[in-house]
Amino acid sequence: MTTEPNTTSFPNLTENDIEEIKNSNVKVNTERSRKTWMNVWSNWCSARGISQPIKLFPYEQLDKLLTKFYGEVKKVNGADDEPESPRVMQAAIDRYLHDKDYGERIISSRQFHQSMKTLNAKAARLRQQDMGKRPNKAEALNQSKEELLWENGSLGNHSPVALTNANFKCLSEQMGLRGRQDNHDA
């Protein structure tokens, strides 16, 4: 006695159904970032007279192109990007290549050493220029600003909050603490 296979447990899916399942987990912002940066890559290639798809370049040639691309890419208005943008750009291109079954990862492969070196140097240069959402250093408190804090009651011994603020200021100055985490650790 043979039994019929249970077709409800094993539906026959089409290629489109399988693609839909794979793409259902892709985040909207991730996909938007990938499209944006791949458009930037396409525009850069068009401006340089490069028509070959990115996934067809051999590793060594793509490393050279990415090195040049990372060094040259700017915003549409000609200004430099934020210091985080080169990493986002690299990740978006890497995701695209990975989805197209490119043999190596441009983020981690030794084949792409020169382009990674250029990308890191550009990001460091942008951070040194105090670009981005987070500046590199805090603004020092000068004498007049400190006196203003004492006068307006933000620092003092008249309330628990003012006393905590005064202690925080003194500990930060005396112990060289740089921020919230250092103070918490202390």
Image: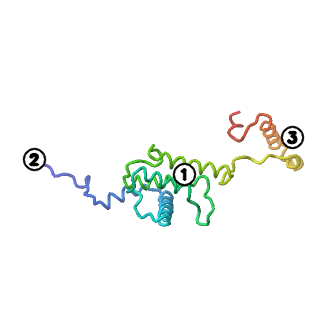
Residue 120: mark in rendering: none
Q: Residues within 10 Å of mark 3 (few under 14, many from 20)?
A: some
Residue type marked 2: Met
Kindly identify the residue that appears in the image at 71 percent across and 41 percent down: 179
Q: Residues within 10 Å of mark 2 (few under 14, many from 20)?
A: few
**Res 163 quadrant in image:** top right
Asked which secondary structure carries label 3, the reply is loop
Q: Residues within 10 Å of mark 1 (few under 14, many from 20)?
A: some
Marks 1 and 3: CB-CB under 8 Å? no
From the viewer's perspective, is the residue at label 1 or at label 2 nearer?
1
> Closer to the camera, 126 or 115?
115
Q: Residue 56 placed where, x, y %?
A: 37, 57
Figure quadrant of the C terminus: top right
From the viewer's perspective, is the residue at label 1 or at label 3 nearer?
1
Which residue in the structure is indicated by mark 1?
87
Residue 1: mark in rendering: 2
Residue type marked 1: Arg
Asked which secondary structure carries label 1, the reply is helix
Residue type marked 3: Asn
Kindly identify the residue that appears in the image at 55 percent across and 49 percent down: 118
Q: Residue 37 placed where, x, y %?
A: 50, 60
Question: Considering only order in the chain, which callout, 2 or 3, is on the residue closer to the N terminus?
Answer: 2
Q: Residue 109 placed where, x, y %?
A: 44, 44
Question: Considering only order in the chain, which callout, 2 or 1, is on the residue closer to the N terminus?
Answer: 2
> Closer to the camera, 184 or 51?
51
> Closer to the camera, 69 or 167?
69
Is residue 7 shown left or right of residue 55?
left
Q: Residue 11 placed where, x, y %?
A: 26, 56
Residue 157: mark in rendering: 3
